[in-house]
Amino acid sequence: MSLDIPDQVRRTVIADGYESWLDELPGVVDSLAQEWSLAIGSSCAGGHAALVVEVTLVDGTPAVLKIGVPGRDVGQEAMVLRLANGGGCAKLLGEDVGRQALLLERLGAPMYDLVADAASRHNLLCEAAVRLWRPVGPDVDLPTGARLAEQYADRLPKLWEQAGRPCSPATVADALECMNRRRGAHDDRSAVLVHGDIHEMNALQASDGSYKLIDPAGLRAEPACDLGTIVRCNPDLGDDLWARTEELAARTGVDATAIWEWGTIHRVVSGVYACSIGFQPFGDLLLAEADRLTA
């Protein structure tokens, strides 16, 4: 079958040395289409870690077929989507983890394209997060917020050096202190399922007008971990970030200090990473804000 593979996906796969996967992909899509009785439509642009294709089920239901590129394990994403069962996230309609394939509810345009006001976007992201959160115990095989904080603490100093020290040492030290406190605050008894990377391009409009999240990283963590990513959003907005934090705390009942600390963690880690890969001006904007707040 003829298959349109977006350039972003093609470049990622070739750069990682998996060019043969591109030749095999049409056969994989054709096989999945036969097994799941799918009519194949157009490929979706925008991502680089998966091929996403519009499909139609045999009963006429619109859906998308997502196939992760080599080196990307969709098993954790599938687990999150099963646990969410359509609450706050796109509904999982089918999975073949062996072929890194997920069949998902088809959603509409990203929140970023539909909602002009940033403050309104933050409220809508918060609503989607609350719909997703649900208790998950240690028997659920997902990484914890404590583990994420540990990984970040190990990675940040090295990444900061590699990126050419793009923010002040005091900003890095502040983020590391926040990581240590959030690691120590983790409690399996109160942990919930969190998305891990909530922002306006990861929230798409559902048929009822609400917004659902896509591409969950998936963690067992305190809810503040997700709210901190909303505090990180829109570094060029110029609003009072502590006021934004307090608004999120008031809406959810989550501790404002925990939200602020996760916001600091996400801001610094994302900013340094963005600078390391040349993703600008996002990286510089995040770190300018981080340095200002630290000072």
Image (cartoon, rainbow, N blue to C red):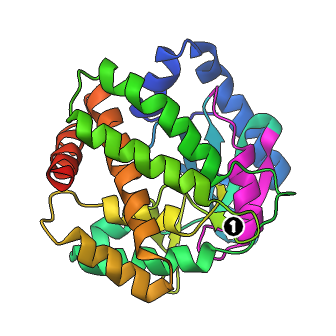
Give the quadrant of the N terminus. top right
Q: Work out whether 161 lies above or below 229.
A: above
On the question of residue 4 being in view, the answer is no
Q: Position of residue 196 (x, y in %)?
A: 54, 56
On screen, residue 95 above or below 283: below
Q: Residue at x 64, y 44 (%)?
A: 147
- For this rendering, which residue is in front, 62 or 15? 15
Along the horizontal axis of the image, is 163 left or right of 55?
A: left
Residue flagged by tag 1: what amino acid is it? Ala
Q: Position of residue 180 (x, y in %)?
A: 51, 47
Q: Report the side of 18 relative to 154 (left or right).
A: right
Residue holding disc 1 = 191
Write down the region rendered in magenta: 70-97
- Asked whether 257 or 46 is in front, the reply is 257
Is there any visible trace of residue 94 in the rendered image? yes
Figure quadrant of residue 117: bottom left
Instruction: Report which quarter residue 247 is drawn in.
Output: bottom left
